Amino acid sequence: MTTRIGIDAGGTLTKIAYWDRENKMSFKSFLSSDFQGVREWIENKHSSSAICLTGGRAEQLKKFLLSKQDLPYMVEFDATMNGVMYQMKQEVISSSSAIIANIGTGTSIHIMHDKTHSRIAGSGIGGGTLLGLGMALTGLTNYKEMIALSKDGKRSTIDVLVSDIYKDNKLPITGSLTASNFGGVTLKPEQARSRADLLAGIQGIIGEVVATLCIQAAEAHGVKDIIYIGSTLEENSLLQEIIESYTILKNKNPIFLEKHGYSGAIGALLENN
Ligand SMILES: Nc1ncnc2c1ncn2[C@@H]1O[C@H](COP(=O)(O)OP(=O)(O)OP(=O)(O)O)[C@@H](O)[C@H]1O
Ligand SMILES: [Mg+2]
């Protein structure tokens, strides 16, 4: 039986970090549409644990849990930063100043200087966009299925590259850069497109928009490290590759943490101590 748990109730997923019997940090997640599942998990396995909540849906979850004790709440961004710093220490990554992008349902961008942080930008392009556009264009609804299929996709049928436009002309910028995400759908009408190609194209939009915002933020603040977190990176090597290659191309240092989506839950768990 564990004694403490940290819960990050987000727009799409509710993430839980807790100590297991061997005192090892462990993780569990539920869809935020399944608060019933969260309640049962707590009642069955962790009924006497001290809970600390964070995330945009924390208040809703608190009401749903009908807890007799007043559950402590931690501001989401504070919890996330604490969780990021804990993971960096565990993974022996050091950075005194970094941009942090949390690619959740939407994307929130922060700057961290030593132990202080502030929110500097955001975008509605995030994991919700991946699921939403993916569903609209392919009919698939399952995240893991979409991610797996996207890995077989060819973005060349969906996007227009700078080199597609400049062809034999002298290139003004790197030819392999995307000139237009999804522009190929109208400009390359002769090409056949599969669901995998469409999903790969969607991943391209999300990765490139988020990385571009972060690179610009890093340049504006004179920072080199960019830490990308959020469950949208979970088991999603294609998105990581898109983000990583573009960030490196722009001379910034991309950092991914092992527990992509769990920084908020980890921060809430540790606050509880
Ligand atoms: N099992 C899953 N089911 C659904 N989406 C998943 C799953 N695993 C990863 N995802 C992706 O993770 C995204 C949610 O990321 P995350 O959990 O970081 O956001 P959130 O905390 O729920 O949202 P926010 O922080 O914006 O309130 C989804 O939009 C989806 O792209
Ligand atoms: Mg979140």
Image: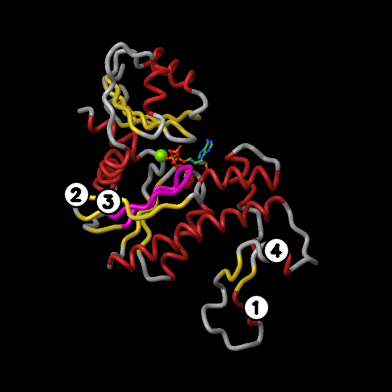
Q: CA distance from mark 1 to mark 4?
A: 14 Å
According to the image, label 2 marks what residue? 115
Could you tell me which secondary element the residue under label 4 belongs to? helix
Q: CA distance from mark 2 to mark 1?
A: 46 Å
Looking at the rendered structure, the kind of residue marked 1 is Ile
Displayed quadrant of residue 272: top left
Is most of the magenta stretch helix, strand or loop?
A: strand
Q: Position of residue 20 (x, y in %)?
A: 32, 24
Q: Residues within 10 Å of mark 2 (few under 14, many from 20)?
A: few
Mark 1 vs mark 3: in front: 3
Relative to 244, is 50 on the left or the right? left
Query: What are the residue bounds of the magenta stretch?
Result: 99-111
* Residue at (33, 32) in percent of width and height: 54
Q: CA distance from mark 2 to mark 3?
A: 10 Å
According to the image, label 3 marks what residue? 118
Could you tell me which secondary element the residue under label 1 belongs to? helix
Ranked by sequence position, the earlier of labels 2 and 1 is: 2
Ranked by sequence position, the earlier of labels 4 and 3 is: 3
Ligand 2's image quarter is top left
